[in-house]
């Protein structure tokens, strides 16, 4: 598994994912807000399967 999520993209994924999960869990948000698990997980592991399919990467070049 090659890392393909980096920098600002990673920070935004973690913040957005955590916010959606908090909204659903703590504030009684809609059920679809649990989708925040996906950006949170991809931000934490630095890998996005969709980026692989599209041939994208936000990691700096090695």
Image (cartoon, rainbow, N blue to C red):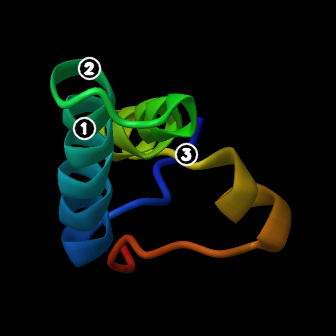
Q: Position of residue 10 (x, y in %)?
A: 28, 59
Identify residue for label 2: 25
Answer yes or no: do the residues labelled 2 and 3 have beta carbons within 8 Å?
Answer: no
Q: Secondary structure at mark 2?
A: helix
- As drawn, the residue found furthest toward the top would be 25
Given this view, does label 2 or label 3 mark the residue nearer the observer?
2
Pick the residue in front: 20 or 39: 20
* Position of the C terminus by quadrant: bottom left
Q: CA distance from mark 3 to mark 1?
A: 31 Å
Circle 1 is placed at which residue position?
A: 23
Q: Earlier in the sequence, mark 2 or mark 3?
A: 3
Q: Residues within 10 Å of mark 3 (few under 14, many from 20)?
A: few
- In the picture, the quarter occupied by the N terminus is top right
23 and 15: which is toward the camera:
23
| Residue, far right | 53
Q: How dense is the environment of label 1, judged by Cα within 10 Å: few (below 14), some, or many (20 and up)? A: some
Q: Position of residue 28 (x, y in %)?
A: 29, 27
Q: Is residue 55 left or right of residue 33?
A: right
């Amino acid at each position: 598994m090659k890392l393909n999520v980096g920098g600002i993209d990673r920070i935004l994924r973690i913040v957005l994912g955590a916010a959606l999960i908090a909204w659903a869990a703590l504030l009684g948000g809609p059920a679809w807000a649990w989708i925040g698990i996906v950006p949170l997980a991809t931000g934490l592991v630095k890998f996005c399967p969709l980026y692989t399919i599209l041939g994208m990467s936000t990691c700096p070049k090695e």
